[in-house]
Image (cartoon, rainbow, N blue to C red):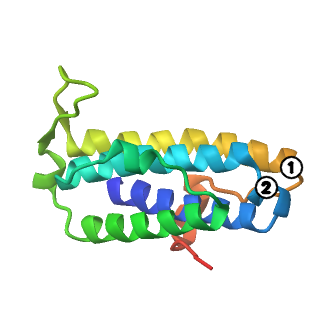
Amino acid sequence: MFLDLSRHKAYADTALLRAIRDVPQAREDAELCAAFHHILLANRFWLLLILGRDFDFEAESNAPKDFSSIAERYRATQAEESAWLERLDDRDLSRLIQTPHLPDYKLTVAHGWMQVCLHSQGHRAQCAKRLRSLGGNPPMLDFVLWLKDRPAPAWW
């Protein structure tokens, strides 16, 4: 289930980015770009924490200037996630991690990554609504529909 949620997240992020790319006013919309940058920022925070790498908040917070740059950061992050997921095992999922943002919490890797999946799901819904208001047509991103064929992310 954990891997399915992670793979669905990658597919859904990419599918929505593709839909935004196809609508010029959406591609240039500051609200959509800010929302996708926020999703990416949170995603990268947890990924780097789990991988034991430093998260440079100041550098990561510098939002890309255009939609293509945001999409490229997503592609690079998904590549890192995929490499990690390929070697993931139960022992790693149960490993404890600690974030300075929640100093009294003891979380497992599974808890942290579930946060990534659920957090991105909520913001994708907001982005889909915004895309529709700009004249775009958001793709169907339901998890149960994805399960049928389990398509991989389709980058352009």
Q: Are marks 2 and 1 in contact (CB under 8 Å)?
A: yes
**Above or below 61: residue 21:** below
Question: Which labelled disc corresponds to residue 134?
Answer: 1
Quick check: 131 left or right of 45? right
- Whole-percent x, y for residue 74 in the image: 49, 63
For mark 2, what is the residue?
Answer: 26
Q: Gap in Å between the C-alphas at discs 2 and 1?
A: 6 Å
Residue pictured at 37% horizontal, 51% vertical: 44
Q: Nearer the viewer, residue 101 or 104?
A: 101
Quick check: 130 left or right of 109? right
Residue pictured at 11% horizontal, 45% vertical: 95
* Residue farthest top in this picture: 104
Q: Which of 119 and 70 is in front in this view?
A: 70
Q: How crowded is mark 2: few (under 14 residues within 10 Å), some or many (20 or more)?
A: many
What's the residue type where badge 1 is placed? Leu
Q: Residues within 10 Å of mark 1 (few under 14, many from 20)?
A: some
